[in-house]
Amino acid sequence: MSLNNNQKNKSLRFSFLDGIFASAMTGFTQEYFTPFLLLLDATAKQVGILNALPNLFASLIQLKSADITDRLGSRKLIIRVFVFFQAVLLLPMVSIALSGKVMPSVFIFVVVLFASSAAFSTPAWGSLMSDLVEEHKRGEYFGWRNRMLGFVTAGSTFLAGLILQQMKKINIFYGFAILFGCAFLWRMFSWYFLNKMYEPPLVHKKEGYFTLFQFLVRLKESNFAKFVLFVSMMNFSVNVASPFFAVLMLRDLKFSYVLYTLITITATLTTYLAISRWGRYADKVGNLRIIKFVAPLIGVIPLLWIINRHPLFLFFAQVFSGFAWAGFNICASNFIYDAVTPAKRTRCISYFNVFNGVALCSGALLGGFLVGKLPSFFGYKILTLFLVSSTFRIFVGVFMPMKLKEVRPVEKISNIKLFFSIVGMEPLLGIERKTIRY
């Protein structure tokens, strides 16, 4: 029996409340794992490992996510169990912060478990949400949802930075213990609201099953498989440099926690200010059209940090970064929902995340290996690494999307008109401003 509109609306409300607390948890953790590892006297190579291994294990564990979901017949059960486990893993982080004398490798191990537990439930969550949101509303809805939750993430990230700055006068390790302890509470509230969601029946069809090997065999002919390869290569190129922006700011440029936080959340805020607009336009002109437009822009981001590292200039660079990533993130997610049938969606999301996790891991490991061996550029080896990453990004962003095809009828639009429409200087015909209500 399928869900009626009332059940769907209730589920979306509970999902949004879950998202609020999950975003608060993210704000208190995601941008502070690297600073905490640096506090434990970790090397740049260990920072690379911190950003590599969680992605690797989080991706590999999803190889079985779809199988177990099909066997249990419930996506919600998978989500409940592994989200709870993720919350519990924040408690060892509190203990590590209170002790203040733990080896970096121990903290990395806990973060790996933390990331893997959440990742296992991701395909099930994506499949569940795609059933709850109407196909023609996905860009608008997820754009709106991500924007609202992005404000929560940015606000909690800023609050966490203030806590650390104040606790630095007392005991900075206790400051991180407060962050991880609050994150545990936020995730438990999130878990409570996830439990209250309704779940449409999961129909298991034999034709929806295919192995990872069968997926790999179709790389040359499958549009979706080519899309997965493109996004994976982009993430590989990005993660060559991405883990080391925090190292540059905190270790090399000696930024305070507050300044580090402000620069970090500038990109986050911009992303979520723009993401709803990108989502509405993607519903009309197509997800792939926007991806082709913003992918090369992502390649320019590291170059801005090479040009100038003054905080005011970096705020501008982060605005540019957030604008580009907003379009890429929302459209990459929604392209999956458009490109695959509901029966195959959980498995496709799993394989998509496997490829991307391996790519993120490989990029971070390569970056960690190169950062100590590259020559200095403007006095910093990390800037040379940024140049390498930028070169990879531009090549992938320009050439790989040429082989991809849009999967639904869309309107055509030029790059110039698309740009001016997005920045608000020219309205796009046929798109109305709407407010999502519950």
Image: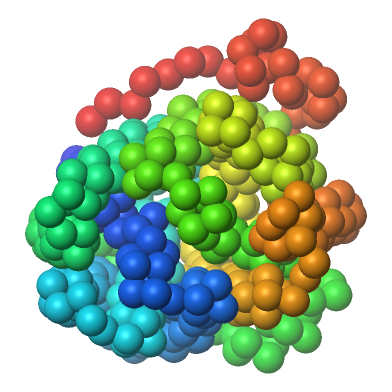
Question: From this viewpoint, is residue 432 visible?
Answer: yes
Is 52 rendered above or below residue 214? above
In the rendering, at what x and y percent does residue 215 appear? 69, 82
Is 356 rendered above or below residue 178? below
198 or 392: nearer the eye?
Answer: 392
31 or 62: nearer the eye?
Answer: 31
In the rendering, at what x and y percent does residue 57 appear? 46, 84
Total count of labels: 0
In the rendering, at what x and y percent does residue 365 appear? 62, 79
Q: Is residue 331 left or right of residue 226?
A: left
Task: Give me the residue at 25% from left, 45% from top.
Answer: 165
Is 197 rendered above or below residue 93? above
Q: How is the image coloured?
A: rainbow
Q: Look at the image and tell me in which quarter the C terminus lies.
A: top left
In the rendering, at what x and y percent does residue 370 appear? 72, 75
Q: Look at the image and tell me in which quarter the N terminus lies.
A: bottom left
Q: Is residue 317 left or right of residue 411?
A: left
Task: Give me the residue at 55% from left, 27% from top.
Answer: 312
Question: From this viewpoint, is residue 428 visible?
Answer: no
Is 120 rendered above or below residue 15? below
60 or 105: nearer the eye?
Answer: 105
Task: Give me the residue at 39% from left, 55% from top.
Answer: 31
Q: Is residue 164 left or right of residue 363?
A: left
Task: Give me the residue at 68% from left, 91% from top.
Answer: 213
